[in-house]
Image (tube, coloured by chain):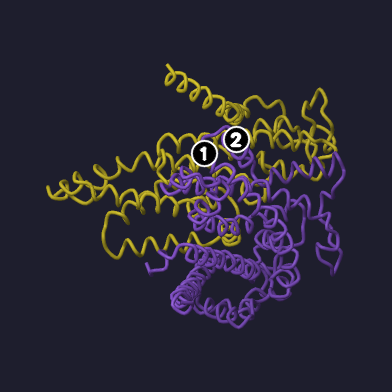
Amino acid sequence: MTVALTRTAFRAGTALALLPGVIALVIAVFGPFLAPHSISGPVGIPWAAPSWGAPLGTDFLGRDVLSRVLSGGRTIVVLPLLATAISVTVGAVIGIVAGSVHHWLDGLLMRLMDAILAVPAILILLVLVTGFGGGTVVLVVVVVLISGPFTARLARSVAIDVSRKAYVESAIGRGESMVAVLYREILPNVGGALLAEAGLVFSNSIFLVALANFLGFGAQPPTADWALMVAENNPGVSFNPWSVLVPVLLIVSLTISANLLADRLARRLAGDDPRIAVR
Amino acid sequence: MRLWLSRPIAGFLVRRLLAGAGLLLVVSLLIFTATDVLPGDAAEVLLGQEAATPRLALVRQELGLNEPAPQRYLRWITGVLRGDLGTSLVSQRSVRSIIGARIENTLILALATGLVVFPLILALGILMGTREGSRVDAVFSAGVLVTYAFPMFVTAVLLSLLFGVWLDVLPPVSLVPVGGTALDSPSILVLPVASMALPSVAWGARLTRAAVAEASRAAHVEAARLSGIAESRVIWRHVLPAALPPIAQVCARLVGVLVGGTVIVETVFNYPGLGLALVQAATSRDVPLVLGIGLLLAAVEIGAYIVADLVGVLAVPRLRAPS
């Protein structure tokens, strides 16, 4: 009875935590089809207050804020998903390989991870932007460089535990190939930890993509993007607060849900495993 | 007794400093390579619109860009070791003088934030961690989780809208008098410090809570409680010493969070510090300036980890053995 109740409460809590994010997600995916105006043509004077024609007013170039809000959620949703998938895969492969081979490659890979972790995250972003200019590919690489080493460390330590288990040793004893052992014996048992890790990487990469767009290194004008809209319209926030507040509200809806989801996922899958730590 | 204790610690410190210097060298190589792989070079940034003219070859020659990359790296890094960080491509001033003119403002901002954040992290972490699972813990943990979910630039924009524009009680833009520092008009510090402090406190309190909770679960802590020792004494004498090494690591990572934080809030409030200079340099692809400020920030972060390791070693002698 109590267990069932706590379970229901847990599920209700999770659903409630996910609600704002789901709303933002729906707007990001279906919004572009509902936009009443073009995202690039002016409909009035800059930073005009809300009116019938433009319910959320206009932005710094006189464009319709509502249309731009409806169209501006794609990068902040798609890019973190893509970056998380690549980052966790790369990190997991490096970590599992490092943790399963017992020779110089382990030391080399992990020292390289240490060196990358020693670079402040914001510096990785700014240095790569300096070298390669902004853009989506650079942002994905930045996420991989920032989060990948953490994932690799985690995957390595879990893989070391797993690779000492009897079923792995017996598989090696049967003469199975290295790849078969890694894929069939070690990966499935590292999976739970990696899923919890993916939740963390995803919520962190939303922060990073939003920040990069805000600083002007990601989505480029005239693209509509929530974080870029905050930066563009902040100077005129006293004239039309909605041009800043609505994009902010949507970004926060997304980050709150992603954070709570990552937190719940980590608790559920990892329990008290100290290796999966908030960061 | 003193000699016997201090020798291993001195050895530990020397080893860590050497390792830190080596790490910084690797980082310098990484960031130099990252800014150097694309064909677009400093001469094009320098000439801008005129890049298509014959002057390009001349400027390349002047800047030594025709040398192979390893040679250019060696020239840059030996210059850095002599204290010469090169010249900004955009302003034509020496990187060292640009850093010198702005470092004070950033230090003021970071130290002021640190003074707010460190005690709060400790207080909240102990408050939540020693009462793991209680209602107090649940309420504060939820508050911390939600606060942390606000990206720092969003917090900064919202605070500046609320207090700078609507309530109009604090300056939404940081105007520092020419030749002065942020301390000449302290009111400009309030909003940037608050914007950095909110997410940093939330982040750090979460990690400190975990460290304190972990230490509170130890058998000797329960034994101390059961034998009737006062709760405050249990916390100070039994929980905190065990939690100190992880807390020191949290503080070291907090330095990294503050490094990133200064970049973000300086941009939002137009605060004339190193972070704003770094963002502007990255936008205009001013490579020498990015490398100079970047290397400095990396050195600060690596230094913070060495200090944290030292604190850990002083608190737990077992960690002193070379690993």
Mark 1 nearby-residue class (10 Å; few <14, some 14–19, many ≥20): many
Quadrant of res A252? top right
- Name the residue carrying label 2: B136
Q: Chain A is drawn in which colour?
A: yellow
* Residue for point 56% across, 57% down: B253
The N terminus of chain A lies in quadrant: top left
Residue B137 shows in the view: yes
Residue A212 shows in the view: no
Residue A54, disc = none
Chain containing the residue with disc 1: B
Chain containing the residue with disc 2: B
Which residue sits furthest bottom? B82
Q: Where residue A5 appears, x then y in whole percent?
A: 47, 19
Residue B132, disc = 1
Q: Where residue A158 appears, x then y in whole percent?
A: 34, 48
Three-letter amino acid code of the residue under disc 1: Glu
Q: Where residue B81 appears, x then y in whole percent?
A: 58, 80
* Residue for point 37% across, 39% down: A192
Q: Where residue B269 appears, x then y in whole percent?
A: 77, 52
Q: Measured along the vertical axis of the image, is residue A243 above or below residue A274?
A: above
Residues at marks 1 and 2, CA–CA distance in whole angstroms: 9 Å
Q: Colour of chain B?
A: purple
Q: Is residue B49 left or right of residue B80?
A: right
> Of residues B203 and A27, which is closer to you in this image?
B203
Q: Measured along the vertical axis of the image, is residue A62 above or below residue A276?
A: above
Disc 1, SS? loop
> Of residues A198 and A224, which is closer to you in this image?
A198
Q: Measured along the vertical axis of the image, is residue A32 above or below residue A131?
A: above
* Residue for point 84% across, 42% down: B165
